[in-house]
Amino acid sequence: MPHARAVRLSRWTLASALTLAMAASAAASAAEPDLAAIRDQVTRQHDVSIKRLQDWIALPSIAAENLNSRQGAEYMARLAREAGFQKVEILDTDGKPGVFATLDAGAAKTVGLYFMYDVKQYDPAEWTSPPLEARLVDKPGLGKVMVGRGAVNQKGPESALLAALHAIRDAHEKVPVNLVLVAEGEEEIGSPHIAQLVHRPEVAAALRDTVGVFMPAASQDAEGAVQVSLGAKGVVELELVASGEKWGRGPAKDVHSSLKAMVDSPAWRLVKALNTLVSEDGNTVTIDGYPKAPAISAGDKAMVAVAAARRNEERVKAQLGVKHWIDDLAWQQANERLVSQPTVNIEGLVGGYTGPGGKTVLPHRAVAKIDMRLVPGMKKDDAVAALKSHLAKRGYGDIEVNVSGGYDPTQTAADAPLVQAQMATLKRLGLDPFFWPRNAGSYPGFVFTDKPLSLASGHFGLGHGGGAHAPDEFLVIEPSNPKVQGYDGAVMSFVEYLYELGK
């Protein structure tokens, strides 16, 4: 009997060992995808992927102009379905519609994606290549680039993420994480209704199970360096409007400019009011009762020091077309100011006649388009309330403050798994990434990082582009610098990141 029992135990042990070995082998297989097969699909699909991006750029959805918002949402939904999302819905808000989609891969982990399908306005006369044709052109010092509105902000990187999903599927590999996608059509006007999308019960429930939410990006600079950003400034977009009607002085319609000798000017009133918002040099906010920005932390200073040493100041100046930083600050100090200081910026001034030549009128109305950037510790609603109170206190209570959008700043800890997976992916790809405290630009990450979701949020993706919000916006497709990834390299960076997140 003891011998028989030993045999049974031996057989059980052997069977168990085989089962465990098979499970381990299956787990190893799942954890180690055939990246070569996926890369082969990325290469094979290059032309199709580029055409997909060009077709997307050809349909501009511009929230500020009420242009193609419904069509843009429908196109975004179609792209999601084609990439493998099983459940795709267009959700209406009080503004432009959004898209909510889920991809159930049967994975242990779920990751959130934030997309925007809208783009900024454009004036074709300012472009060297038609903004909706997404032509491939040679750009000296960079290689072959795609020029078009949305090429880098954000359709290019987003299309690369979608191309990664196509390549994984067509290589007969399994997407390593479940995905929850939220796409909006109002980012370029300050995301006024993003909370209506994200806080819908079904969307919030899906996001609550994620390890965090990231936005695809082309994060390399022109020399190939890549940063991992831990947040973004908040923003308020608004118009200040001075008019004879609201003021009770000045004309109710444009009149001859000779009458300025006895008629008040709403345009000058707006200029005088604007002058009270900032210091004499225009670089420090002087709004009474404005939320105070905390001093830059030692940790943020250390991050900036590393980044400043890694970036080429002269190249950045050349790209921006500037010769001096504020107050002639040194490179590192200018970057410290970039990440730590709030701003009040005049985007545009509109009033009276602005066509060719002159037209001697005294305008009855003048408008200043303003954006205000906020750093962590500041709140959008507090900033708006302070601005309105300041104008009233200074005698400009008649000037209308029309807020079109905006949101609070966002911040994510460096040790968040979403962020650590970025660092691990980049290092495995042979890069030497560095942390950056926060983007000076804005995106509505607050809706993910703030309560009730309290998720990590960030940006990820290789590749390089430029000209966001400006003429000749571009994305590098075939780089001349081997340290910079082209379109296919950006696609593979998303493949690698998704598999890292799935571990």
Image (cartoon, rainbow, N blue to C red):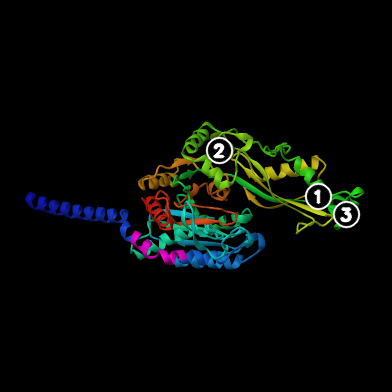
| Residue appearing at x 59%, y 32% in the figure | 295
| Residue appearing at x 52%, y 40% in the figure | 313
| Residue appearing at x 51%, y 67% in the figure | 55
Q: Is residue 425 visible?
A: yes
Amino acid type of the residue that numbered disc 3 sits on in the rendered structure:
Pro
- For marks 2 and 1, the one nearer the N-term is 1
Alpha-carbon span between mark 2 and mark 1: 35 Å
Q: Secondary structure at mark 2?
A: helix
Alpha-carbon span between mark 2 and mark 3: 45 Å
In this picture, is 288 found above or below 93? above
Q: Which residue is mark 1?
A: 267
What is the crowding at mark 1: few (fewer than 14 residues within 10 Å), some, or many (at least 20)?
many
Q: Which mark is residue 251?
A: 3
What is the crowding at mark 3: few (fewer than 14 residues within 10 Å), some, or many (at least 20)?
many
* Main secondary structure found in the magenta portion: helix
Q: Is residue 121 magenta?
A: no
Q: Which mark is residue 335?
A: 2
Specify whether 211 is left or right of 394: left
- The part of the chain drawn in magenta is 39-50
- For marks 2 and 3, the one nearer the N-term is 3
Q: Is residue 41 magenta?
A: yes
Q: Position of residue 385 (x, y in %)?
A: 72, 44
What is the crowding at mark 2: few (fewer than 14 residues within 10 Å), some, or many (at least 20)?
some
Q: Secondary structure at mark 1?
A: helix
Q: Position of residue 498 (x, y in %)?
A: 40, 54
Q: Is residue 408 visible?
A: no
